[in-house]
Image: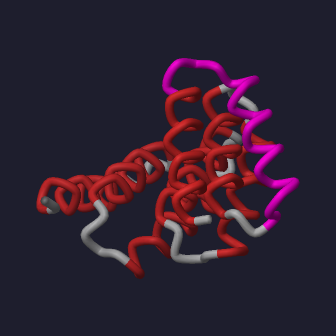
Amino acid sequence: MEEEKEAWVYFVEILINQGKYDEADNACNAALKIDRKFKEAWYYSGLSYYKQSKYIEAELSCREALELDNYYASACLCLGAALFKQNKFSQSEEVIKNLLKLDESNKDAWRVLSIILQKQCKFKEAELANKKAEECK
């Protein structure tokens, strides 16, 4: 079963990277009909929606993934970005800061946080977040 899930993840990543969002959405929906607790299917559904600028749908799918695994870094980043695109800056900031509490070495999270803080005119904090990103490997 795990090998099938890994193959599915690889397949959906290819579809998303090729911009075949309808096919990716169909694959995610089919996987979720089989296993509603397949966190990767929820995450990739969110990512596909995000890339289509469907930020509310992306938010909902990422929240489902995080309900299953609140340590799922990719889903946190996608959720933070979806909230940001909806101008929910304080919620976006909170999501990313919570991720950083779990993993202070997440370079992408520090970069995203820097952007969120800049948008809120928190320039000193944004600069510190950017420096933290540079310090990460």
Residue 21 or residue 33, whichever sits in front = 33
Quarter placement of the N terminus: bottom right
Whole-percent x and y of residue 28? 74, 43
> In this rendering, would 113 be left or right of 9?
left
Residue at 39%, 72% (x, y): give it.
Answer: 100
Find out whether residue 23 is within the magenta segment.
yes
Q: For residue 90, which quarter of the picture? A: bottom right
> In this rendering, would 79 be left or right of 119?
right
The stretch of residues the image draws in magenta is 17-36
For the rendered model, the colour scheme is: secondary structure
State whether residue 7 is above or below residue 106.
above
Residue 73 or residue 92, whichever sits in front = 73
Residue lying furthest right: 33
Whole-percent x and y of residue 80? 57, 54
Find out whether residue 51 is within the magenta segment.
no
> In this rendering, would 81 be left or right of 33?
left
Residue lying furthest top: 19
Residue at 75%, 34% (x, y): give it.
Answer: 25
Q: For residue 82, which quarter of the picture? A: top right
Q: How many marks?
A: 0
**Which secondary structure type mostly characterizes the magenta part of the structure?**
helix
Quarter placement of the C terminus: bottom left
Residue 64 or residue 3, whichever sits in front = 3
Residue at 27%, 57% (x, y): give it.
Answer: 107
State whether residue 49 is above or below residue 1.
above
Residue at 63%, 46% (x, y): give it.
Answer: 44
Residue 128 or residue 106, whichever sits in front = 106
Whole-percent x and y of residue 84? 60, 45
